[in-house]
Amino acid sequence: MIEPIWLLAAAATLSGVANANPAQFEHRADKLEAHLQQRGDAGAPEAVSPPHYPSPWMNPNADGWEAAYIQAKQFVSQMTLMEKVNLTTGVGWEGEQCVGQVGAVPRLGLTSMCMQDSPVGVRDTDFNSVFTSGQTAAATFDRALLYARGLAMGQEHRGKGVTVQLGPVAGPLGRAPEGGRNWEGFAPDPVLTGISIAETIRGIQDAGVIACAKHFIGNEQEHFRQVGEAQGYGYNITQTLSSNIDDKTMHEMYLWPFADAIRAGVGSVMCSYNQINNSYACQNSKMLNNLLKGELGFQGFVMTDWQAHQSGVSSALAGLDMSMPGDTVFNSGLSYWGPNLTLAVVNGTLPEWRLDDMAMRIMAAFFKVGNTVGSQVPINFDSWTLDTYGPVHFAAGVGHQQINHHVDVRADHGTLIREIAAKGTVLLKNTNNALPLNKPKFLVVVGDDAGSNPDGPNGCSDRGCDNGTLAMAWGSGSANFPYMVTPDAALQAKAISDGTVYQSILANNRPDTTEALVSQDGVTAIVFVNADSGEGYINVAGNEGDRLNLTIWHEGDQLIKNVSSLCNNTIVVIHSTGPVIVDEWYDSPNVTAILWAGIPGQESGNSIVDVLYGAVNPAARTPFTWGSSRESYGTDVLYEPNSQTPQLDFTEGVFIDYRHFDKTNQTPRYEFGYGLSYTTFSYANLNVQKVPVAPYTPNEGYTEPAPTISTTNASTNLADYLFPNSTLSHVWQYIYPYLNTSSSGKEASGDLHYGEPADKYLPPNATDGSAQPYLPASDKISPGGNAALYDILYTITADVTNTGPVTGDEVPQLYVSLGGPDDPPVVLRGFDRIHDLAPGQTGVFSAVLTRRDLSNWDTVKQDWVISNYTKTVYVGSSSRKLSLKQTLA
Ligand code: NOJ
């Protein structure tokens, strides 16, 4: 039986406490004290998030949402108050079969919607595929593959009866390379992440599944993301971490890919655990009302991360639409919403238009991806057990029936996964034609990262260990392997078919036998090493989600040095969730080749064989910078609380990853966008054409007032909302929309503001349903912000010629310098993967520059503005190999 993930979380946390050295926690408490004294305060919040109300309602004319709006309106207008509440509130942790489910609307034929992880495949089930991680998929720089991956993942979710796939990820963006969940996302560059998330969303939603762009926003580290989790590790905090992000950095970095997600029509967004400028993400009106729904015109629904919900009416007014998994904390049987939301509408605290808007957004997303009521694929798996029969309400242990139908949804996705992992593998070094391999005489493979986990590929729950080869990292962003091809298995099969002598030592700690083996004559040695990370609820070897350092795990550096000191043809393959420090050995002449194979998924071994032997000529580019020390990045995880509400100040602004290395003039080991091929390419003939376009006009005017969707005329008699004992049997801990009592007394409601007029305690304008002014950067119809931001101002072309001996793909990249004193030297703005250029063949790279691409966020105008500084366009093969350049007129 699979352990329920959050029970496991609790277990991991508790065992963390039990095994921990109490002195370590005292030490942590002392450190906090010292920080507080240094700051001269008691942890008083510094950054402040300004309020923004009311919450924008759906726009019937929004591009791509028009038909869904009409369908949703038709459906929602028939719903009762409690049916609408039921749609907004999860049934509680382990209340049903998916990691999250909301209540059904049986009267209208709607079955319960299922929210299921993860961004790499259907989690907690069987007969599903495990895809290449987002980060490794981003390394392909291949839009078509990113789309195909999304489509295939969507098809698998659909086949299991999932309504919302909980992914893809643009937060974390990857501010700090140590960040535990960077591998779930794409890259610490907003444009690469933006394009990647948009393609993935299109794929998922074309399969009939709602995608969920997460985690919104500033969720850049695992430490202190949840109070209980952090306390379990011995940290004395009382509120979650606050990511303190200024307006310009927010727009130019962290919000940017979410704009692309919304433009791609994403149906849902998950708000994160952390606070932004000292206001919780799931009730932050600036983030949800102003940026997400106002400025970006997001038409879908916002759901909380699991237990990220912090309040009742305030979160509803701040723009939240769905509470996940519905209970306040797991299995409390209590909810901020559910009955409280019913009561809030009945007693007039929450205007019904806001509840209607929640229901509209949820149903519109449902229809937008092609669902129809009554024809949903039934949920045919159970997240809490792989047993065929069991309780449908797992937490309560009731409703025994068949819960797992073991539906095989994999199709031939293994082929695609193999291709993506191979095409996402970055060749970092290749000397003396070490690669591709051509029937080597004697191949030796060394390292525990080449073999299997002795407990099997799924032996550690949620992949919470680093035993054997690293093909997936840990946390809720995981899925169960149907099989996993290890590098050892695939290389051995290839070697045997070639007549190569093959031997492997699948351990890092066998110095004697390893040295004896690799010293033999004519050996080509491949050393496999890794570095793992994951989600904060699991602690692997002291790494509480975030990596403790950027070094290779299991003494891998020593292993590489040992092998390469004896073998002059040592090839290194790295599986990791981000950059590692390679300084101790990367320039050794005996290390003839280095490959980064990322987090490849189930076809790991086959993919690396394809690259090592040249069936796939590498063209992937590293989606992050490889520095020579952790300090060289200028950003890091906050590992020790600096306040009881830990404050993570994003003082580096837009200067993360390559932007920081460029600004500080440091030479990284391998720069962002870098990657070699078995052939070579030259670049020529940069051509920049200006496109005539109308000037930018900030949006102005007013929205329509909040529409009247509801036709139910809800009763104000509380007795009408009581649990229907005669028709329904109550499931323990289950969250319902019904009230427990018809008493409206202060004691019964527990309401601190009982009897006070709402405007005494609600923020100004919070319940105002009148027409609202448009924000200048927003659009009347187009999701993603002012449509003019996406006007094409320049088209760019360049010739790319294969100057080497073999056919290969090339990834030309377009960068611009925005020219201002506060701008990074260059920023990525476009790329393409040109396929299969034969030797001597020339292909044309074309890209565009939109208005957004050339703008900065103006914090005074609250809009995008093209500065007067001279702009320069660069094209080349990496962020530092930019051979073509032209100034813009
Ligand atoms: C918490 C994670 O942060 C989120 O990504 C995931 O979707 C939920 N748990 C549900 O498992």
Image: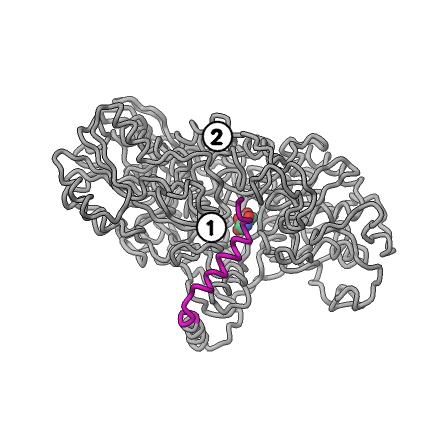
Q: Amino acid at mark 2?
A: Ala
Residue 148 badge: 2
The residue beneath circle 1 is 172
Q: Residue at x 46, y 77 (%)?
A: 40
In 3D space, how far apart are the residues under numbered discs 1 and 2 (Cα atoms)? 23 Å
User: Is residue 844 highlighted in magenta?
Assistant: no
Q: Residue at x 33, y 46 (%)?
A: 530
Q: Quadrant of residue 80?
A: top right
Q: Is residue 229 above or below residue 22?
A: above
Please report contact status of discs 1 and 2: CB closer than 8 Å, yes or no: no
Scheme by which the image is coloured: one colour
Q: Is residue 438 visible?
A: yes
Q: Quadrant of residue 422?
A: top left
Secondary structure of residue under mark 2: helix
Q: Is residue 714 above or below residue 410?
A: below
Task: Name the one closer to the observer, 810 or 855.
Answer: 810
Q: Position of residue 147 (x, y in %)?
A: 48, 32
Q: Is residue 703 visible?
A: no
Q: Residues within 10 Å of mark 1 (few under 14, many from 20)?
A: many
Q: Amino acid at mark 1?
A: Pro
Q: Position of residue 577 (x, y in %)?
A: 38, 47
Secondary structure of residue under mark 1: loop
Magenta region: 1-25
Left or right side of 491 for 737: right
Task: Name the one closer to the observer, 206 or 486.
Answer: 486
